[in-house]
Amino acid sequence: MVASGIVAILMSLDSGVDALVGVVANIVPAGIFAFFAFRFAGASKNDLVVRSFRKGIALKLLFTFLIFTWVFKHTNVQVLPLFIGYIVTLVAQWPGMIYLHRP
């Protein structure tokens, strides 16, 4: 969200909205993945965890594809701000994963 605000200030309001679309194109599929990936826990549910994780990955890829397809087909979006929003949101997740992985 902050990235889209910065893009809006530096470029234009329309570019900021396009960056926000890129943010949403990352957050929605990631949320779907997280829902399926962390639905089950425990050693006794190992098969359910693996199946749910795979389903989450497949749905994440599908929804990412569908969102980008819809955006490029039905809107007049600027590609650079869109991918700036998407990539910044993608990279912003990494410090959280590194922090949570520390022993």
Image: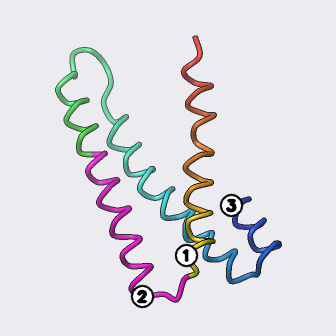
Mark 1 lies on a secondary structure that is helix
Identity of the amino acid at label 3? Met
Q: Nearer the viewer, residue 58 or 87?
A: 87
CA distance for labels 2 and 3: 23 Å
Query: Which mark lies nearer to you, 1 or 3?
Result: 1
From this view, report whether residue 75 is shown above or below residue 5: below
Query: Where are the magenta residues, as a range?
Result: 56-77
The residue drawn where x is 33% and y is 70% is 66
The residue drawn where x is 32% and y is 42% is 36
Identity of the amino acid at label 1? Val
Q: Which residue is mark 2?
A: 74
Identity of the amino acid at label 2? His
Q: Which residue is mark 1?
A: 79
CA distance for labels 1 and 3: 17 Å
Q: Is residue 26 left or right of residue 93?
A: left
Q: Which residue is mark 3?
A: 1
